[in-house]
Amino acid sequence: MTVTNAFRATLDQIVAAVGDLPAAPAVMSSAMKLTSNTESKIADISKVLSSDQSISAKAMKLANSPFYGRKRQVKTLEEAILVLGFDEVRSIIMAASAQKMFASDDPDGPESKLWRHSFGTAVAARQIARWLGHPDEGEVYVAGLLHDIGKLVLLQNLKDRYMEVVTQVEAETGSFRILEQQALHFNHCDVASMLLSKWSFPSDLVQALTSHHRPPTFRAGTTAPIAHVVSLASDISKHLDVGFADERIDPLFRHPSAIILNLGHEATEELLLETYTIYHSEMSLFESP
Ligand SMILES: [Fe+2]
Ligand SMILES: [Fe+2]
């Protein structure tokens, strides 16, 4: 792929302003490389899971939760994988590694707010994908989880300079996207795109993150681009009131992606309710050690 001069200038600008971008957490990279249709997937995913104790503990806890209604206790990782299913385990690995990146001691601080918003977006994105019968449910979940990771990178690298943007968003004087553009001449989507390309994530995922504030057009009857799913999911997450809520569209069915995805008042309200319930039950998995 050729990188245009204009894009190159932006990349140089970002590196100059932000510095070197972090490497992907090892467990996240391994989980992304797992494919969902190999014969050896249980052995492979069990290997990835057992490389991280806190993540495997979460998988065991979830497999033993009332939601899965098992009469007998699940005692081994292999059993847990069978109970939860491949996609669910991959989602836990991705969410638990993302949570480590957003970790902060301050539950009201910007990292914690970003984490809760991102987790809510991932849950909402998965529910939308199920509603639409989208073929890439797992990828849609990861896109939701990482869609605003550029904000985290900016926060961790630019500190006080980016806190000015955060303070203005909290004072409701503007949106992240516009304030970032004014202060830095690029926004969190550009940073996410660079970061995920560096992490060698699939190009459609990178594209979805780059364009989640300006999703591409698509033909009716074809698979909706992930960017539309993430764009609406991010707004559903804002309606949970658990993190930042700039640019929130109310009511949800007026969101441009809800219109394009043909999700009316009833569907968006149902999706919000489902997301609320799942968010609060699954978040408990991440709140305890
Ligand atoms: Fe965003
Ligand atoms: Fe967002």
Image (tube, rainbow, N blue to C red):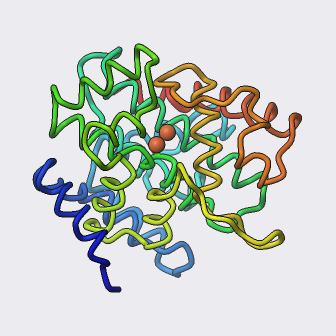
Residue 46 location, quadrant = bottom left
| Furthest-bottom residue in this view | 1
Where residue 259 appears, x then y in whole percent?
79, 48
Closer to the camera in the image, 43 or 176: 176
Where residue 63 appears, x then y in whole percent?
55, 43
In this picture, residue 7 sits left or right of residue 243: left
Closer to the camera in the image, 103 or 149: 149
Tell me the residue at 26%/75% (across/down): 5
Where residue 25 appears, x then y in whole percent?
24, 55
In this picture, residue 244 sits left or right of residue 201: right
* Numbered-mark total: 0
In this picture, residue 220 sits left or right of residue 168: right
- The image shows residue 103, relative to residue 138, as above or below, that is above
Where residue 13 appears, x then y in whole percent?
18, 57
Q: Which quarter shows the N terminus?
A: bottom left
Tell me the residue at 52%/80% (across/down): 38
In this picture, residue 211 sits left or right of residue 137: left
Tell me the residue at 23%/19% (across/down): 105
Residue 222 location, quadrant = bottom right
Closer to the camera in the image, 283 or 114: 114
Tell me the residue at 40%/66% (across/down): 32
Q: Which quarter shows the C terminus?
A: top left
